[in-house]
Amino acid sequence: MEENMEEGQNSKGCFECCVKCLGVLPYASLFATILLYAGVALFCGCGHEALSGTVTILQNYFEVVRAPMETLDVLTMIDILKYVIYGVAAAFFVYGILLMVEGFFTTGAIRDLYGDFKITACGRCVSAWFIMLTYIFFLAWLGVTAFTSLPVFMYFNIWTICQNTTVVEGANLCLDLRQFGMVAIGEERKVCTGSEKFFKMCESNELDMTFHLFVCALAGAGAAVIAMVHYLMVLSANWAYVKDACRMQKYEDIKSKEEQELHDIHSTRSKERLNAYT
């Protein structure tokens, strides 16, 4: 009987602990963090593989060769973009953790645990800093989304031409890299619709896979933009909460001070009356 009672108390304690933990979770920040991680992972993973596929297409079908080390060519720029992707993945992994921590310390359960003054003293500065930083990242991800749409548009045109080879069979259409600024004006790197390289490129898996990878990277960048907007809403709400908590703390301090003064006045008068009576 005693063992059953102990097991019931333990299960009740575990249930109360789980309920308390669920009450501490900042669900809005958690949803934004999951969306941010999903978007950044999709953008970085698909973008990296799409850039690798682009290098393969340029080297195999457009015969683009790597320039000497002191020259900045399209292949070197693609390598730089890959390193930028590594940095973006690491930076936003850390930033998502920081925003989650900020969300934890502005929930009601954490406030009750550590006290109002501790939260409001440093919370206003932290919330304002995160709002400014998140807005900057929001504008940056908007630029990344716009930049990612360019290769999607380019590959969509190439993919459309390949899908309609029978329509353009009589026309002499050429894909010239000089039109996209990928090579110098003096270099002729093009593939025409009637050539063997064009049919090989259209039949290869690199073109189709690279196009769809860029589409997924664009979707990941869009998800990151939505996550930044969601973070801005959460941080603005937290800022308003911390600001109201600070005002309430000042009000409570003034009220407590006035009550103490009234109590001292009444105590002084009571002593004066007692002294006068005696």
Image (cartoon, rainbow, N blue to C red):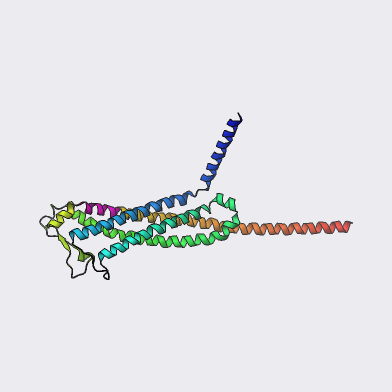
Answer above or below: position of 17 versus 4.
below
Residue at (62%, 59%) from the top-left corner?
A: 250
Answer above or below: position of 113 versus 64.
above
For the view shown, which residue lies furthest in the right direction?
Answer: 278
Residue at (39%, 54%) from the top-left corner?
A: 226
Residue 103 is left or right of residue 4, and the answer is left
Residue 35 is left or right of residue 215, and the answer is right
Residue 12 is left or right of residue 161, and the answer is right
Answer above or below: position of 111 versus 70.
above
Res 142 quadrant in image: bottom left
Q: Nearer the viewer, residue 54 or 144?
A: 54
Res 262 quadrant in image: bottom right
Q: Position of residue 208 (x, y in %)?
A: 23, 52
Residue at (43%, 52%) from the top-left corner?
A: 33
**Residue 152 visible within the image:** no
Q: Position of residue 249 (x, y in %)?
A: 61, 57
Q: Which stretch is magenta?
A: 204-215
Q: Position of residue 83 (x, y in %)?
A: 34, 61
The N terminus - image quarter: top right
For the view shown, which residue lies furthest in the front direction?
Answer: 69
Residue 93 is left or right of residue 202, and the answer is right
Res 144 quadrant in image: bottom left
Q: Nearer the viewer, residue 95 or 166?
A: 95
For the view shown, which residue lies furthest in the left direction?
Answer: 170
The C terminus - image quarter: bottom right
For the view shown, which residue lies furthest in the top direction?
Answer: 1
Q: How many circles with numbers are drawn on the protein?
A: 0
Q: Position of residue 59 (x, y in %)?
A: 21, 60
**Residue 125 visible within the image:** yes
